[in-house]
Amino acid sequence: MKNKLGKQTLQFPLLPRIVGSYSIVGEKEGKGPMAKWFDMVLEEDTYGEKTWEKAESKMLKQAMLQALQKSGREKENIDTVLSGDLINQIMSSSFMARDLSIPFLGLYGACSTMTESMILGALMIDGEYASNILVGASSHYCTAERQFRMPLEHGNQRPPSAQWTATAAGAMVLSATDKGDAAVKQGKKQQHGQEMKEVYLSHATVGKIIDTGIKDVNQMGAAMVPAAVDTILRHLSDTGRGPDFYDLILTGDLGLIGKDIALDLLSGRGVDLTAIYNDCGAMLYDKKQDTHSGGSGCGCSASIFCGYVYDEMRLGKINNALLISTGALLSTISSQQGESIPGIAHAVAVTTKGVI
Amino acid sequence: MDYLYAFLIGGGICVIGQVLMDTTKLTTPRILVIFVVAGAVLTGLGLYEPLVQLAKNGATVPLPGFGYSLAKGAMDGAKEGFLAALSGGLKNTAAGLTAAVVFGYIVSLIFSPKSKR
Amino acid sequence: MAKQQQQQQQQQAKKPKKEVTKQYEQYVKQFTPRPKYFTNCAKAFVVGGLICMAALYIQNLLMKDGMSEKNAGAFVTVILICSAQLLTGFGVFDSIGKFAGAGIFVPITGFANSMVAPAIEYKKEGPVMGVGAKLFSLAGPVLVCGISAGTIIGVIYYLMK
């Protein structure tokens, strides 16, 4: 296996590129500190639809189509769509793909779906089974909350460790060739007067499930931290890279509490990431927005990867980043039956340097 | 004086609920169930009645009061016979329950849920 | 023999896992901010107490008009339930709940809210299997357990008589 490093890491010698991306978030997220990085902020979380599920599906579709447009490609050029979400039987993704008439593979990795789709998309391109792949993920506060927790109008108090499911979606076009992204390039070039860089996917580390035995659905972040830490350490040892290789190591939705635990666990293993580590869930909201432990959901990491990370990399402000979407693979039934929460984390290494 | 007791006892029962919410992992529906069943059991043991005499609505408005009404209706019915023991609990709470179901149904059909900001 | 050994091994493997979980939970606790016990309790106490006082006030008013105590009590319950459900419909109850916690949740108002909140959410699933069924998704357990407990106590009373 010439393209496998160590136990869990894959490398992509053909270096699939990200040639277009689009992020779309809800009203609350649009008032947070990351607002300027998102391509679109909804004025209302219903997005003009009758149900929350339809709204989420429309957000995902919008992200997909706009990412496609920004990549300068046509629908006919796309070989496969890979996407997922949190709602029963990945409803938002399936109904999004219903209208696209592009071959579709639905994924479920809970909140780890964004990197899961990126890894599989990169594999298809690197294996020369596809030249253009559309990947994405979405989540919506109102659809997730009623499925996993309490109804919206229920007058309960959220504990301090609770996280806020992000109303957000993100999509990317992965491609084997071409500089692409012409429209953005022109626009941004004028703005910043500097050349835009290409963004490549170089490595991926597929995580394994780690279950710490935590059963509290309001401690999601803490339940996922060991999986994230395991994937980060595994990635570093498989690739032989030191943590200082990266400008940014970004986990998906561990939240404020999870971020502290992750840093502490990593430093316990002799890896100090304080300067370069961050968490999308911890970045998405302002403390004043009263989300308690920060954001969660597929859309949390999807929107930040597609918005902030991608734009910063295009501008050359970040050159090497390790993106880790983290997922809590529980179901509503498993938690009622008293099962603990299995955590998972997949990592993708992105670089602006066209070499491995 | 009645008002003071209603305030103190009613507030006190709510504080018990708040402590359960903050210190245990019990979800709110479970806490409601615990309160109703506790109210019924305490009534059965004859411990809740004095509280109702003392605090009036302070003891009947919180959810243990719902358990109290159910148990008291059944216990009063038991004096008349087996069937009355079965029907007593619901008879005693019928007005509130019916209002909750019918009005709740109407409200749910009229209004729509709103996203939280 | 082999089976016994296997069982023993399994038991040994299980035991440390539970301890690991416990240790991790303890560890996580250090990072989790505690709820504001005192302010939460104070808010619950005041709001809950005020609701009970208001209920008593209304009951006294009704009784002044010549209503029997039992009828007045039922009337007050109906008023509380309906107003809580209306507030839920207007989308205000969740904000009050966030502030007052158990103060509004433990009085009968919380029960009324837990009927309407899920029902309203499942409106799009239709008036029968949506609203009709979900009206009881949270309140159902309360009714089932409450009615069962009350009736069992009544029957025990009947048998003891």
Image: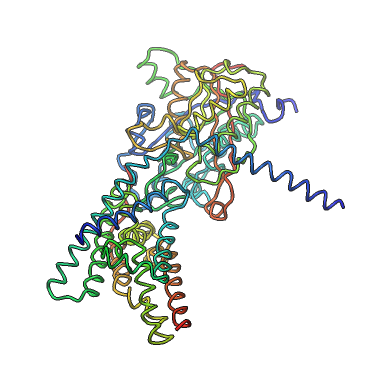
Can residue A260 be seen here? The reply is: yes
Q: Quadrant of residue C125?
A: bottom left
* Scheme of image coloration: rainbow
Between A262 and A84, the residue placed more toward the observer is: A262
Query: Is A75 on the left-hand or right-hand side of C49?
Result: right
Residue at far right of view: C1
Residue C160 position in % (x across, y down)? 47, 81
Between B9 and A15, the residue placed more toward the observer is: B9
Residue A76 position in % (x across, y down)? 52, 38
Residue A292 position in % (x across, y down)? 39, 37
Figure quadrant of the C terminus of chain A: top right
Residue C111 vertical position relative to residue A234 in the rendered view, above or below: below
Residue A165 vertical position relative to residue C135 in the rendered view, above or below: above
Figure quadrant of the N terminus of chain A: top right
Between A284 and A352, the residue placed more toward the observer is: A284
Residue A250 position in % (x across, y down)? 51, 26
Residue occupying the point 45% across, 67% down: C145
Q: Quadrant of residue B32?
A: bottom left
